Image (tube, rainbow, N blue to C red):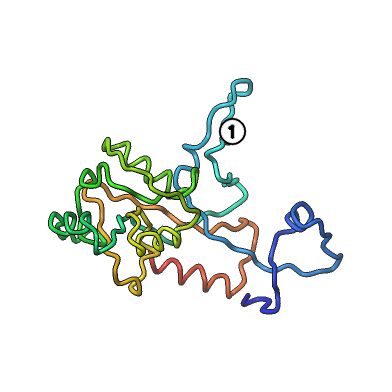
């Protein structure tokens, strides 16, 4: 939007052809397109092809990155935290058992304290959902999936309404939702890394360099 404020839709060359069935006119000038990308488990979501022996993408792989052609920089690290409505029994229990940890973003609690509790979860294969499942499995904790939603904002809305709790990245914590409290997980520093990807032979524009610099300040 900084490079072309009047634009209503931004897409790559191939996306215009394949998704929107449009052809980019000869002589048109491109702009830098950047997007954040969850870097966790990129290599772990690959399996070996039985015939070639090479690693290939599975259904769990959101998108593959050719690291030979692209730079991939971590610009943010967000801790996975437990979001709980202040009016629930779970909040009172966690608040009583929580301890301050200077290495954590919020008061820390034992992950086993949420065993058997009701939680909202993101859709299957979404990075935060995968990270949450890995942590629960690691500590043999089972939660009841009350509702499935498609975004982190929807998770907070569910918690705010008092329906159930949720695991969310610390980056979306909102002070305006005053009836929600957040707790770090005592046993582990569970983070999702967010990165920016751009071609190695690409000279970034000044606005794009400024954006990356601003994002990196949060790492």
Which quarter of the picture shows residue 163?
Answer: bottom left
View extreme (right): residue: 26
Which quarter of the picture shows residue 158?
Answer: bottom left
Q: Residue at x 31, y 56 (%)?
A: 81
Q: Secondary structure at mark 1?
A: strand
Q: How many marks?
A: 1
View extreme (top): residue: 51
List x then y, in percent, for residue 64: 58, 44
Is 113 positioned to the left or the right of 59 in the image?
left
**Residue, disc 1:** 56
Is 88 positioned to the left or the right of 218 in the image?
left
List x then y, in percent, for residue 184: 25, 56
Q: Residue at x 43, y 47 (%)?
A: 129
Instruction: Determine crowd level at label 1: few under 14, some 14-19, many 20+ residues with C-alpha closer than 10 A.
Output: some
Is 91 positioned to the left or the right of 81 in the image?
left
Q: Residue at x 63, y 23 (%)?
A: 52
List x then y, in percent, for residue 74: 45, 57
Q: Nearer the viewer, residue 4 or 199?
A: 4
List x then y, in percent, for residue 175: 33, 73
Q: Considering only vertical position in the picture, is 24 above or below 176?
A: above
Q: Nearer the viewer, residue 145 or 195?
A: 145
Q: Nearer the viewer, residue 100 or 216?
A: 100
Quadrant the C terminus occupies:
bottom left
Quadrant the N terminus occupies:
bottom right
Which quarter of the picture shows residue 153?
Answer: bottom left
């Amino acid at each position: 939007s900084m490079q072309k404020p009047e634009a209503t839709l931004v897409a790559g060359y191939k996306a215009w052809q394949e998704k929107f069935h449009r052809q980019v006119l000869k002589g048109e000038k491109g702009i830098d397109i950047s997007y954040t990308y969850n870097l966790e488990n990129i290599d772990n979501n690959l399996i070996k092809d039985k015939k070639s022996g090479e690693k290939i993408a599975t259904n769990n792989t959101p998108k593959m990155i050719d690291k030979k052609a692209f730079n991939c920089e971590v610009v943010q690290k967000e801790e996975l935290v437990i979001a709980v409505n202040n009016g629930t029994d779970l909040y009172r229990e966690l608040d009583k058992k929580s301890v301050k940890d200077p290495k954590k973003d919020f008061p820390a609690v034992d992950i086993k304290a949420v065993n058997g509790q009701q939680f909202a979860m993101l859709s299957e294969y979404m990075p935060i959902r995968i990270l949450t499942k890995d942590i629960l499995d690691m500590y043999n904790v089972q939660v009841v999936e009350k509702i499935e939603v498609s975004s982190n904002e929807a998770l907070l809305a569910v918690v705010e309404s008092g329906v159930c709790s949720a695991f969310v990245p610390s980056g979306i914590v909102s002070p305006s939702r005053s009836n929600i409290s957040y707790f770090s997980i005592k046993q582990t520093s569970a983070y999702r890394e967010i990165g920016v990807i751009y071609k190695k032979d690409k000279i970034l524009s000044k606005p794009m360099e400024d954006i990356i610099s601003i994002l990196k300040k949060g790492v």
